[in-house]
Image (cartoon, rainbow, N blue to C red):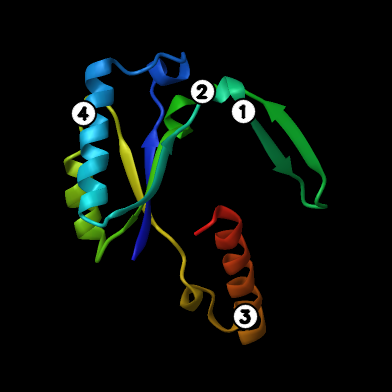
């Protein structure tokens, strides 16, 4: 199963404070362990919300753009991984090994076609498969 591991923002990450050399080395070693185990598919850090924007949609589909920074740190993301694991429990075990102090990770499984039931018709599934193939080709995968 594929999961996204969301690294929650902290006040320090929102201030734009970069990790120490020691933390970067620890994260590099951790990421290397994930790659060698065949777990890590993707991952990266994100700039503070002051560099971002939110697009909010009303009930009629109109969009409003709100530029960052955003005030509620607990609701922000500062990084992510995409992992391929056998279960949520395996993801939790890997997450426990992360070299964070005072941070928080959230693990969320990706939706699979079965989650959408009959609404995700064979035609829609085929179209989705074509889009995935096209994006993989664009990345050179």
- Separation of marks 2 and 3 at Cα, in angstroms: 37 Å
Q: Residue at x 58, y 84 (%)?
A: 118
Tell me the tag on residue 26: 4
Q: Nearer the viewer, mark 1 or mark 3?
A: 3
Secondary structure state at the residue bearing disc 4: helix
Q: Which residue is mark 2?
A: 48
Disc 1 to disc 3, C-alpha distance: 33 Å
Tell me the crowding category of disc 2: few under 14, some 14 to 19, or many 20 or more residues within 10 angstroms, Cα based.
Answer: many
Residue 19: x and y in percent read 33, 18
| Secondary structure state at the residue bearing disc 1 | loop
- For residue 32, side relative to residue 62 (left or right): left
* Along the viewing direction, whichever of 8 and 28 lies nearer the viewer: 28
Q: Name the quadrant containing residue 130.
A: bottom right
Given residues 45 and 67, the one toward you in this image is 45
Q: Secondary structure at mark 2?
A: loop
Q: Can residue 120 be seen in this snapshot?
A: no
| Residue 75 visible to the viewer | yes
Between marks 4 and 3, how big is the CA–CA gap? 42 Å
Task: Identify residue for label 3.
Answer: 126
Read off the residue under disc 1: 52
Q: Are marks 1 and 3 in contact (CB under 8 Å)?
A: no
- Marks 1/4: CA–CA distance: 27 Å
Q: Earlier in the sequence, mark 2 or mark 4?
A: 4
**For marks 4 and 3 on the same chain, the one whose residue lies earlier in the sequence:** 4
Depth check, mark 1 against mark 4: the one in front is 4
């Amino acid at each position: 199963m594929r999961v996204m591991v969301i690294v929650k923002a902290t006040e320090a990450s929102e201030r734009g404070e970069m990790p120490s050399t020691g933390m970067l080395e620890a994260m590099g070693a951790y990421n290397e362990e994930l790659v060698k185990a065949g777990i890590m598919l993707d991952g990266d850090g994100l700039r503070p919300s002051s560099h971002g924007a939110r697009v909010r949609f009303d009930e009629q589909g109109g969009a409003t753009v709100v530029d960052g920074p955003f005030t509620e740190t607990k609701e922000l993301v500062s990084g992510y991984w995409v992992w391929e694991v056998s279960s949520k429990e395996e993801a939790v075990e890997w997450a426990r090994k992360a070299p964070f102090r005072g941070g928080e990770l959230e693990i969320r499984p990706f939706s699979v076609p079965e989650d959408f039931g009959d609404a995700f018709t064979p035609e829609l599934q085929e179209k989705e498969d074509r889009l995935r193939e096209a994006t993989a080709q664009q990345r050179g995968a």
